Image: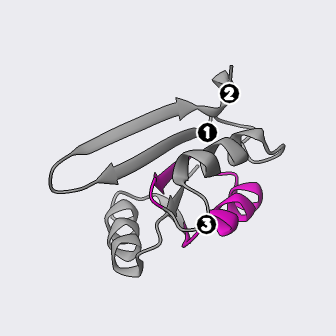
Amino acid sequence: MVKRVLVVEDYDDTREMMRIMIEKYGYSVLEASGPYEAIEKASEFHPDLILMDIGLPLMDGLTTAEAIIGKEGTANPNSRTSEVCLNCSPSRCFLTASNCSDKN
């Protein structure tokens, strides 16, 4: 079974580059350009992994991740969906990961 990845990024070029790189490894990729589209597509697509920009317009990536985790039916019933939020700048880069199934 092909693993599904949802890429959430508001910059078109960055999102496209991520999609191309991930597809080269044989994953199925769906893209979302904003938080509300990400929530909707996570519900429809049931991704195994979500790569999300923290600095999204309208709602930040962490809040979007919480909305996806809290929305029933977004996790893939056959695997544990993971949220991965990325934010990089020239001065710093950090990664935040949380497992949807382990929400406290």
Disc 3, SS: loop
Q: Earlier in the sequence, mark 1 or mark 2?
A: 1
Which quarter of the rendered picture does the C terminus lie within? top right
Residue 33 is one of the magenta-drawn residues: yes
Q: Residues within 10 Å of mark 3 (few under 14, many from 20)?
A: few
Q: Dot 3 corresponds to which residue?
A: 58
The way the protein has been coloured in the rendering is: one colour
Q: Quadrant of residue 23?
A: bottom left
Circle 2 Cα neighbour tier, 10 Å, few/some/many (<14 / 14–19 / ≥20): few
Q: Say if 34 sits above or below 50 in the image.
A: below
When the figure is inspected, residue 58 is found, relative to residue 95, above or below; the finding is below
**Any mark on residue 81, and which?**
1
Of discs 3 and 1, which sits in the foreground?
3
Image x and y of residue 59, in percent: 61, 59
Q: Amino acid at mark 3?
A: Leu
In the displayed structure, 8 sits above or below 63; it is below
Identify the disc placed on residue 101: 2
Q: Residues within 10 Å of mark 1 (few under 14, many from 20)?
A: many
Q: Reading the chain from its start, which is encountered first: label 3 or label 2? A: 3
Q: Residue at x 45, y 46 (%)?
A: 85
Which stretch appears magenta?
A: 31-55
